[in-house]
Image (cartoon, rainbow, N blue to C red):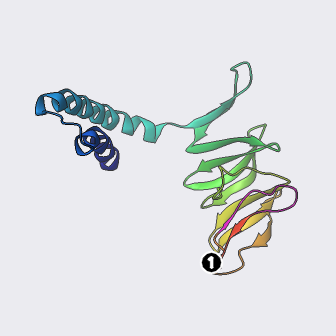
Amino acid sequence: MKKVVLFLLLLLLLPAWGGRAQTPVDQKPALEALKELATELETDLPHLRQARHGFIDRRGKLVIPARFEDAQGFAEGLAGVKLDGKWGYLDKTGAMAIPAQFARIEDFAEVHRFREGLAVVETARGTAVINRQGRVVIKSRGPGFSRFSSFFEGRAVFLGPG
C-alpha cells in the first residue's frame, strides 16, 4: 500500500522537477486527492483480501461457486485455481482435476494455462512441466533453469544460465 501511495505522490510531483513551476497552491488539491485515494484503497483492501473467485457461463449463470483465492481462465478444459495457498487445476464441472499442490502456475511470458497438453508449475523442487494428469514430464534442469514459457508448436522458451 505504501508503495502505491509513494508512486502516486511521485507522479504528482514529477512535473515540478521537469522545469514547470508549481506553487504550493497548485499542489494542494492534488495532495488532497492523493490522500483521499489512499484512504479509499486502505478501506477496500480487507474486502479484496476476503474476495473469492468463481466462474459464470456466457449467459451470466453461476456455474462454479466463488470459493477460490485466485483463478485463471480455462484453457484446454482446465483452469488454474488457488486453494489454501496452493495452486491446482479445475475442470469445467468444478471438480479438481489436478489437486492444489503447486506454489505457482505461471511463467515469465504470460499468465500460465495449459497449452499443447502441458503447463508450467512451481513445485517444492523447482520449476517443472506437468501433463493434464498432473504428472511431472519435465523437471528443472538444475540451478539457473528457473522459468519456462508455454509450449507453442512443440517448443517452450526457458530462462537458464548463459
Q: Nearer the viewer, residue 66 or 155?
A: 155
Residue at 20% across, 26% down: 29
Q: Using the rendered view, name the quadrant where residue 73 is placed.
A: top right
Q: Is residue 85 left or right of residue 92?
A: left
Image: 5 above or below 100 = above
Residue farthest to the front, as pictured: 19
Q: Using the rendered view, name the quadrant where residue 10 is placed.
A: top left
Q: Amino acid at mark 1?
A: Gly
Residue 54 spot, x, y in % from top left? 63, 34
Image: 98 above or below 126 = above
Residue 158 spot, x, y in % from top left? 71, 67
Residue 93 spot, x, y in % from top left? 78, 37
**Does 70 lie within the magenta span?**
no
The span shown in magenta is 147-156
Residue farthest to the left, as pictured: 24
- The residue that disc 1 covers is 144
